[in-house]
Image: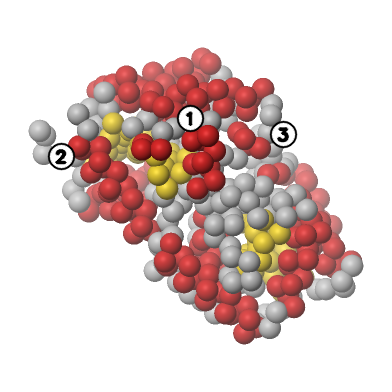
Amino acid sequence: MRSIYKIAMVANSSWNLAHFRAPLIQHFLAQDKEVWAIAPMDESSQRLKAWGVRCLPLQMQAKGVNPWQDGHTLWQLYTYYRKHRFDVALHFTVKPNLYGSVAARWAGVRSVCNVSGLGTVFLHNTPATRIARWMYRLMLPAADWVFFQNQEDRQLFLQRRLVQAERSGLVPGSGVDTDYFALTPLPTARPFTFLLIARALYDKGIVEFVEALRLLRQKYALEVRGVLLGKIAEQPTKVDIPRKQVDAWVKAGDIEYAGVVEDVRPLIAAADCVVLPSYREGSSRALLEAAAMGRPLIATDVPGCNNIVLEGVNGFLCKPADSSSLAMSMKRMMDLSVEQRKAMGIAARQRVETLFDTRLVIEAYERVLQYLNTLQ
């Protein structure tokens, strides 16, 4: 048996690996494991290389289904796996989960998938989502283990016989570094600030956020500030909110747009409350990072959010796709005293430390790697 343990980590962007999987990567490197990143090259590739990660470029169209391009991605992964003979391939994001599992099975490489959220695949019933569900059924069983980030998603896959109970389990999102996202005091500046951290997608509830802010100002005559932080698609599809719409909201004074930042901590620190009116999540990293910094939360009562936010404990829940329900939760938050919001923030921090700390993610992966080592 060779002495160096080789791990391939595969995602739809190098940024994804550097941003979401950094603690896991650093853990493996500290164990003298050989870590390879297989993903489309981007501005984060150099950061990965600086850590000591070996990078292999992956040609992949992140969105949509194109048989020719996707077939090339599958073949490229198979070629890499055959050539480098990894001990295990860890797959993240949809296409690596699917094509990577099949490529690894063909190449005789053990593989682990991480289903971070079902998103549009199960929220909509379009030709593309029907194809995606068919592909899950066809390809996901090739994985040796499948992680889910909430029990509802796992149960859905079990009911549809897409995975086996004995070859699947839960992982607490991508984990939160509670040292990096340290507890910070609530701001004293006014107006009251709500922050929403999300890509500009309709399914993130951004339209409802804007409408709720309008209700607070018009119906309740409240002075309130709403900030949107997140990427806007340069070539939007029908699931994306186009830049011109965001620009129109900003021009009308409905929200402020903070763009995309490398470090979200200053914006979280400046917020009184962090909001996520998403229609469905895996286990929202935005909520977890905000909670770690002691911010009270407002989120929809849906999988991936209601496992983080406990009603009346560390925040409030609202109905999905309901701007009036969201506005009422936001007003309830504004009506609390500073001490009450501070208590919610401390409860939010404690919940992250107990259930979502990065060390728990690392431990979950280590247990699965040990399990894979026992397989013939």
Report if residue 341 is visible in the image.
yes
Which residue lies at the image location 15% right of the left edge and 39% below the top edge?
4
Q: Residues within 10 Å of mark 3 (few under 14, many from 20)?
A: few
Residue to which mark 2 is pinned: 4
Disc 2 to disc 3, how far (Cα)? 46 Å
Secondary structure type for disc 3: loop
Q: Judge whether 374 appears above or below 199 on screen.
A: above
Indicate which disc residue 238 carries. 3
Q: Judge whether 314 appears above or below 212 on screen.
A: below
Label 1 with label 3: CB-CB less than 8 Å? no
Secondary structure type for disc 1: loop
In the picture, the quarter occupied by the N terminus is: top left
Camera-side residue: 115 or 11?
Answer: 115
Amino acid under disc 2: Ile
Disc 1 to disc 3, how far (Cα)? 27 Å
Which residue lies at the image location 29% right of the left edge and 43% below the top edge?
368
Residue 9 lies, in percent from the top left, at 35, 38
Report if residue 258 is visible in the image.
no
Residue 365 lies, in percent from the top left, at 32, 47
In the picture, the quarter occupied by the C terminus is: top left
Which residue lies at the image location 75% right of the left edge and 49% below the top edge?
321
Disc 2 to disc 1, how far (Cα)? 33 Å
Q: Earlier in the sequence, mark 2 or mark 3?
A: 2
Nearest to the eye among marks 1 and 3: give it.
Answer: 1
Camera-side residue: 52 or 374?
Answer: 374
Q: Residues within 10 Å of mark 2 (few under 14, many from 20)?
A: few
Amino acid under disc 3: Lys
Residue placed farthest to the right in the image? 219
Q: Is residue 356 left or right of residue 63?
A: left
Residue to which mark 1 is pinned: 162
